[in-house]
Amino acid sequence: MKLLVVDDERAIRNSLKEILMDEGYEVDTAEDGPSALEAVAKEKYDVIFCDIKMPGMEGTEVLEKLVAEGTDASVIMISGHGDIETAVDCIKKGAFDFIQKPLDLNRILITIKNATDKARLVSDNKILKKRVYGQQMIGSSAPLQHIREMIEKVAPTDARVLITGANGSGKELVARSLHQQSLRSAMPYIEVNCAAIPSELIESELFGHEKGSFTSAIKQHKGKFEQADGGTLFLDEVGDMSLAAQAKVLRVLQEHKLSRVGSDKDIEVNVRVIAATNKDLKAEIAAGNFREDLYHRLSVIVIHVPSLNERKDDIPLLVQSFSEQICGETGKAVREFTPEAIALLQQHNWTGNIRELRNVVERLLILGGSPISAEDVKLYV
């Protein structure tokens, strides 16, 4: 592990370096802010100790520059003039921790360990995100390019988004892309399929419940809104939500507060809500099945995902992508599709959209020849 000590006092700088080297760490030093930034530009550090009071460039300015440049190092601020206000300010600006002088060896070593654990968690989280969010919207058609442009504009904001489109068209991928490209990407991304949860349980699922609030409530449960605090909550098939749950969701969106089932205590939450539906919500409003005020809260931005029949130009790329995925999962060599086979797939009526196409590609890879021919498509599609 490589550490950097930044302090204008030579005695403190060298003393801390010797102590840390005795503990087995590789340590560099810098006497001021510009030297520190220069060192970070050349070397990758795991932990940076930075004094606050330094001539020329103060430690807080160094911290701000490091954070702005997206350093992966954990920055620990040190000062002999610290107080609670200073410590809080440093943490808000992106410091991992704040230690007061005179420096205590045990506190330093514990802080380094905690910083290392955090770095490991961040690394694991990045790997997990690649697995969870690994799917991408495949294609180069005009409708898909429009969606990408919308996502690029909307994602960095906190605007609520309503995603519409038929089942299997890829609404979930749009929601994940919005979260990935948002300022909340490091925070939780929680999905709720409103259609899959019985109406009598949806409130408990979304808002949580207290122990004993109903027969099977054997312990306290945090709902999806609380789990997504600081991040994004994706309400899939929101058109299937009960009116009672809709009223509570509306309150959370208006007041940023919720109360668990069986409790009258308010809990503040900071959640970006993205919703999706395959229903015509305006028709549902007219039928009395969906609240108009909730619709307007959810639909600040509306993104419509076209059906596969509306973007058939993307079928060749989708088939290639699915073929690579499926063959990779089964450990088999990737099989090609003849141009004639692709042409027939483009002529098909894809009522099940992307989901149906993936199933068809998997079926053809199992039952078809090599390469997959037009005859295979006629036989098995």
Image (cartoon, rainbow, N blue to C red):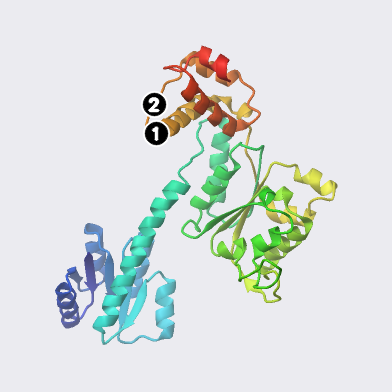
Quadrant in which residue 258 is drawn:
bottom right
Residue name at image x 84 percent, y 50 percent: 288
Mark 1 or mark 2: which comes first in sequence? 1
Query: Which quarter of the rendered picture does the N terminus lie within?
Result: bottom left
| Image side of residue 121 versus residue 234, left or right | left
Residue name at image x 61 percent, y 37 percent: 168
Q: Percent x, y for residue 257? A: 66, 69
Q: Percent x, y for residue 68? A: 38, 62
Mark 1 closeness class: few <14, some 14–19, many ≥20 residues within 10 Å: few
Q: Percent x, y for residue 365? A: 47, 24
| Image side of residue 335 versus residue 277, left or right | left
What type is the residue that disc 1 sits on? Gly
The answer to whether mark 1 and mark 2 are in CB contact below 8 A is yes
The numbered dot on residue 328 is 1
Q: Secondary structure at mark 1?
A: helix
In this rendering, the answer to whether 44 lies above or below 62 is above
Residue name at image x 26 percent, y 81 percent: 106
Query: Which quarter of the rendered picture does the C terminus lie within?
Result: top right
Q: Nearer the viewer, residue 7 or 256?
A: 256
| Image side of residue 370 versus residue 104, left or right | right
Q: Nearer the viewer, residue 368 or 71?
A: 368
Quadrant in which residue 9 is drawn:
bottom left
- The residue beneath circle 2 is 334
The numbered dot on residue 232 is none
Mark 2 closeness class: few <14, some 14–19, many ≥20 residues within 10 Å: some
Residue name at image x 70 percent, y 69 percent: 261
What type is the residue that disc 2 sits on? Val
Q: Secondary structure at mark 2?
A: loop
* Number of numbered markers: 2
